Amino acid sequence: MSGPMLPPQKQKPAAEADAVARLGQQLKALVGADWQDRDYGVAVSGGPDSMALLWLMVSLLPGQVRAATVDHGLRHGSAEEARMVAGFCARDHIPHAILTPPAPIRGSLQAAARAERYRLLDDWRSQQGLDHIVTAHHADDQLETVIMRLNRSSGVGGLAAIRARNGSVLRPLLGWRRSDLVALALDADLPFVDDPSNADVRFDRARLRKELTAQRFLDAEAAARSAQWLADADAALDWTAERLIEGWPDAGDRAVIRDDASPAEIFRRIVARRLTAYDPRLTLRGSALDGVIAAMRDGRRAMVGSLLIDRVGAVGGGLWRISAAPRRKARTPR
């Protein structure tokens, strides 16, 4: 991507130069040796963390960075914040776009807004010919997410929390503290705003953030490292389940599920993989999957969505078949 002509770069203080170099190391770890040859889009809300990320990215890769701000229009002042980011980008010759949803957000407000934000950003990335979207999630975000997942009894995958890389989305700041990013934004004299929804205690995350601000026991950077190790463990379990399936004599038959006395978590992943391979449209929640596995282990027929799982052979054997459940006949009105 050929970027606009940029003004000469001023010499940065040592701390800022170290921060830029640190970001480069993390992008290299996430992307690979050719990370400097890629083009990046930065998601910028206007908060201090995303403004600091944009500044770091442009300092590191001048001419290879574009920015986008998603304005859901859900609260008063959001349009003005988007214009603030646009003004900063215009001043510093950074291409910038304001993205807005084509229709009002419906459903669970925060979850729906998040899904729409990533959809808009990915469409923009594709249109601009960018390789990656970079977001400013940091160690404090990760700690909040880990605790929220603990409260939901999440397993290994859930406790891995925010992934450093998810498809084209990169999150290189997961080891950085919020306070460090705010200090960087202040030192670089960057404009920024504080999103009032971050302090709105109607939302679970905002309430948790308020509680965490007052404590000094939990270490956000340590939690971020633990989440990364859990992500590595999650990937290793997936890899093991996939290799076991590949070793089956009938692995090509999507209707087959085998159990060769696998540990419970491996078998759980095997069942999930086979069910979604048979029906990619299946939405498989943890509680539903647990019910299916309990029925299978008890020798009972299991059902999830529109699928049936039947044991083949005697109880105690390790072979099941998946099939489509018969359609229920419509009741004839009396």
Image (tube, rainbow, N blue to C red):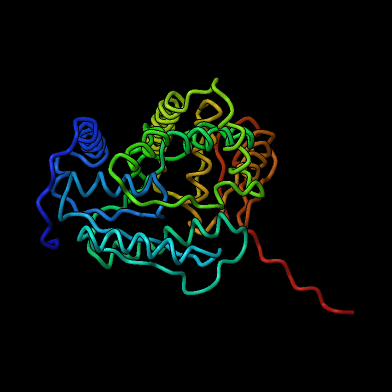
Q: Tell me which residue sits at (36%, 54%) in the image.
A: 44
Would you say 330 lies left or right of 90 here? right
Q: Is residue 167 visible?
A: no
Would you say 235 lies left or right of 290 here? left
Marks counted in the figure total 0
Q: Quadrant of the N terminus?
A: bottom left
Return the x and y of residue 180 as percentages of the image width and height: 37, 33
Residue sitting nearer the eye, 208 or 263: 208
Q: Tell me which residue sits at (20%, 39%) in the image.
A: 32
Q: Relative to 164, say whether 130 is above or below.
A: below
Return the x and y of residue 94 as percentages of the image width and height: 22, 59
Return the x and y of residue 288 as percentages of the image width and height: 64, 45
Residue sitting nearer the eye, 245 or 214: 214
Q: Relative to 197, say whether 21 is above or below.
A: above
Q: Relative to 326, say whether 331 is above or below.
A: below
Q: Is residue 234 visible?
A: yes
Q: Tell me which residue sits at (62%, 33%) in the image.
A: 211
Would you say 227 lies left or right of 29 here? right
